[in-house]
Image (spheres, rainbow, N blue to C red):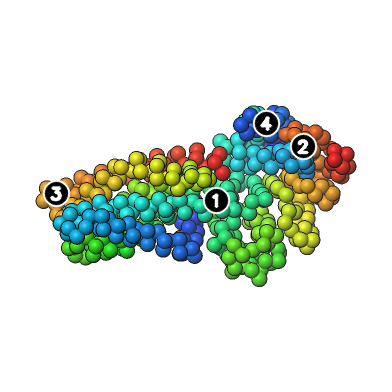
Amino acid sequence: MERGSPAVLCTGVGRRFGRRWVLAHVDLAVERAESLLLAGANGSGKTTLLRILAGLSRPSAGSVRVLGRDPHSERLTCRRSLSMVSHRSYLYDGLTALEMLRVWARLSERGFSDDQLGALLEEVALSAHRDLPVGGFSAGMRKRLTLVRTRIESPDILLLDEPLAALDAAGKRLVERWIAREVERGTTVIVASHDVTRMSRICGRGLLLEQGQIGWTGPAARLPAEVEGLA
Amino acid sequence: MRSLGQIATLVRKDLLLEWRGRTRGLSVVLFGVVTLLLFSFAVGPDSTALRAGAAGFLVLALLLSSTLALSEGFRLEHENHALEGLLLAPVEPVALFYAKALSNTLFLLLLAPVLTPVAVVLYAVDIGPATLLQVIGLWGLAAAGLSAPGTLFAAMTSRLRSQDVLLPLLLFPLVVPVLLGSVKAIALILTGDPMQQLPSWTLLLAGFDVIYWSLCGVLFAYVVEEGV
């Protein structure tokens, strides 16, 4: 990790699928411990940007640095500092919740005992389901389980793509508390969400993507009004 | 050493998933048995011809069953985009490859204790327990030679609708040396080896295994990195 460098630095980042540019000329710096809320209509490039930051997709133009490093050539270092919750659950339906957490913990080389993993499941109200295959879980339960992964990985940068999707009211409150705690801990948090009003209460800065380009950036508290104006 | 621990975790996960979805494994085994049965029907009651072709039929049954097993193995990785989840972890793609290839080899190896006795009965081959163990050992080398390129191509084709067609089309030409080596070596075990040719065929098979496992491990990163 390079000292003093921003948590995330995008310079002229663009991503093209075929002839269509879904992201273009994105210049963005996210400081360490900053929380950024990404908003924008469907197809505005939020998920693509998060995937590029996570190193899951290469930019077609420009460059990305995560904690001063290139997420592709210095893949492992970046992965150790970063965790992502996507709208994809990344779960194996045939494994139980506890087994799934064990896999994540071992791959992340974090020494979690079953009791510790059980306590994390308790936090997301899944302890009664710890020995049940995740194939039988609802979308909301899956989302809660994937959130636990972020606690196991204990990242410096947390990327969240629609973290409130598929959750009931209690689940949304839980995730809000979860994110707020990460922000308080000093984790750099980048959230892409359509639930701008709710998320703007947690995040410090807002960014509006319009057709793959940065349309507006400013305090997150003002983002709901900007999104409203766009509609 | 770190990667070894991660590989062990991933292999354990794969074997657990295979065990939980054992109807899938059972269907692969049954497919192998049916293939052996069909070869015996095709050749007819000529026991000399059956014995002469036993090694080839056995390896072909393994090859055909392997395509089913390999594509099924990777389908699991794409349910809920689990492979992408693994790529988000601090794991080298090469470790993901060796874990998956090892799981596939173990699974194909498990076919041997079922298919070999079936072949012995169907093709009237007369072998003792020591010869049977030799065949299973050779089967292990053949399984390793199939599963390394098979894992790579299964990863390449796993998101395509035409995977079931493409996987054998890509895999079969590449594994011809494995097919030749294993058929020759198993035939020598079953029918006798007066010229002492078995070590050279076994060495050839092992050599191709080393090449496949090295090369496919390197290529796998390119396949999965932008392919998720």
Where is residue B210? Give x, y as percent: 34, 44
Q: Which mark, residue B78?
A: 1
- Callout 4: SS: strand
Task: Name the residue at 64% across, 63% down.
Answer: A137
Q: Disc 4 vs disc 2: which is toward the camera?
A: 4
Badge 1 sits on which subunit? B
Kind of residue at badge 4 = Trp
What is the quadrant of residue A177 in the picture? Answer: bottom right
Asked which secondary structure carries label 3, the reply is: loop
Vertical side of A27 occupied by A170: above or below: below
For residue A209, which numbered disc appears in the image? Answer: 2
Secondary structure state at the residue bearing disc 1:
helix
Residue, disc 3: B196
- Quadrant location of the C terminus of chain A in the rendered image: top right
Q: Earlier in the sequence, mark 4 or mark 2?
A: 4
Taking depth in this image into account, of B167 and B188 the one nearest to the observer is B167
